[in-house]
Image (cartoon, rainbow, N blue to C red):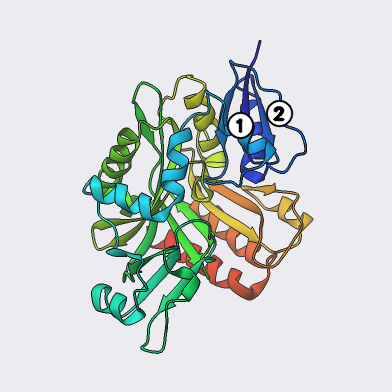
């Protein structure tokens, strides 16, 4: 009988986990958290999640209470930015200086403690630039409903945004992908590039950081660590206890994708080191309609999520992979002509420049 794995959440990550489970002979079932009936779980089933937090519904209660919900105790701890920061600090890992927003603390007090520019982040929720509030001037105030609900971070003048995706199995063995360079525009990830030779000297530093976190949490599966590069030092920005957007390039560019790794780890299958198959660029599709002409592009693979297209919404991504940099650059230029100029002109230019600087 096939191993059955339930995924709490039925978004694009759940769909990609389901697809990755097929070659492994795993039955993967993403579940919409608002379904009117609870899934019929067996004692031998496994449960994972495509999201860090969830409301209490009939479905989430059934899944979260299952004794084989892998990493169940980790999600809440990392979904709360306060407890996540406390964990990072307790392990002596580098992160931006921060404060808890409590006791009616004022914007000026926070700026006195953290510096001229301070970023407020909601403790839970908020992604793609949402749930954030800047304190830059004397006129900026901490919103009343953010007291006790947010953390404040020192604004970091970073050189680049870099992420690391790794996997840990139940034996405590960790495997990592090469570091990924990321471009965010308005808080939304638009492009990721991996591997880059000029980042290799930071690989060991990043693996030590994420490995320490994985072991401290006794975590099983894939986790992503977003960092800021300041010179040759990495500062942890945020952690995601799940498969992650900046690891989507692994679907086309590695022998084992992040989705397959996650399933292998939680199902107690082997997790050998991956082979990277070429130079990779991932372009997110944000609020743009499907264009059949994307399918004509050399070395490009389109992943369409089938979601309603809305402004600022991730509706798909395109992975480009090749061992021929000229072919990769030419394909990026052609892709740029097939995407809305707003934001994408900058994303394509950044991607081309990053490849040239490698």
- Sooner in the amino-acid sequence: mark 1 or mark 2: 2
Q: Residue lying at the far left in this picture: please name it.
A: 92
The residue drawn where x is 32% and y is 54% is 198
Question: Where does the image place residue 192, in percent across and percent down from the top left?
Answer: 49, 55
Looking at the rendered image, the quarter that the N terminus falls into is top right
Given residues 200 and 6, the one toward you in this image is: 6
Question: Where does the image place residue 133, in percent across and percent down from the top left?
Answer: 46, 73
For mark 1, does the 10 Å Cα neighbourhood hold few (<14), some (14 to 19), or many (20 or more) residues? many
Q: Is residue 133 left or right of residue 176?
A: right
Question: Where does the image place residue 227, in percent across and percent down from the top left?
Answer: 36, 56
Residue 332 lies in quadrant: bottom right
In the rendered image, the vertical position of residue 40 relative to residue 308, given as above or below: above
Name the residue that disc number 2 marks: 39
Q: Is residue 268 left or right of residue 197?
A: right
Looking at the rendered image, the quarter that the C terminus falls into is bottom left
In what element is the residue under mark 1? helix
**Residue 275 visible in the picture:** no
Name the residue that disc number 1 marks: 63
């Amino acid at each position: 009988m096939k191993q059955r794995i339930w995924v709490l959440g039925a978004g694009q990550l759940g769909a990609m986990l389901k697809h990755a489970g097929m070659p492994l002979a795993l039955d993967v079932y993403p579940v919409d958290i608002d379904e009117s009936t609870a899934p019929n779980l067996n004692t031998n089933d496994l449960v994972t999640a495509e999201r860090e937090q969830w409301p209490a519904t009939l479905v989430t209660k059934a899944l979260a209470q299952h004794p084989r919900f892998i990493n169940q105790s980790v999600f809440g701890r990392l979904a709360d930015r306060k407890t996540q920061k406390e964990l990072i600090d307790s392990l002596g890992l580098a992160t931006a200086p921060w404060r808890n927003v409590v006791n009616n603390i004022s914007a000026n007090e926070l700026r006195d403690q953290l510096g001229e520019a301070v970023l407020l982040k909601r403790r839970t929720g908020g992604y793609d630039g949402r749930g954030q509030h800047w304190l830059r001037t004397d006129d900026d105030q901490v919103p009343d409903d953010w007291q006790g609900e947010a953390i404040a971070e020192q604004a970091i003048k970073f050189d680049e945004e870099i992420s690391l995706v790794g996997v840990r199995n139940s034996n405590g063995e960790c495997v990592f992908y090469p570091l990924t360079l990321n471009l965010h525009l308005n808080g939304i990830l638009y492009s990721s590039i991996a591997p880059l030779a000029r980042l290799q000297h930071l690989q060991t530093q990043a693996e030590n950081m994420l490995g320490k976190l994985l072991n401290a949490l006794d975590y099983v599966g894939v986790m992503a660590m977003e960092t800021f590069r300041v010179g040759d030092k990495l500062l942890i920005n945020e952690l995601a206890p799940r498969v992650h957007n900046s690891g989507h390039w692994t679907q086309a560019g590695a022998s084992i994708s992040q989705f397959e790794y996650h399933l292998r780890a939680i199902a107690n299958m082997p997790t050998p080191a991956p082979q990277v198959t070429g130079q990779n660029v991932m372009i997110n599709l944000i609020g743009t309609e499907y264009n059949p002409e994307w399918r004509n592009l050399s070395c490009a693979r389109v992943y369409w999520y089938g979601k309603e297209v809305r402004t600022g919404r991730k509706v798909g991504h395109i992975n480009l992979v090749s061992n021929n940099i000229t072919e990769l650059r030419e394909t990026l230029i052609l892709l740029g002509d097939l995407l809305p100029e707003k934001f994408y002109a900058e994303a394509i230019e950044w991607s081309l420049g990053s490849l040239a600087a490698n």
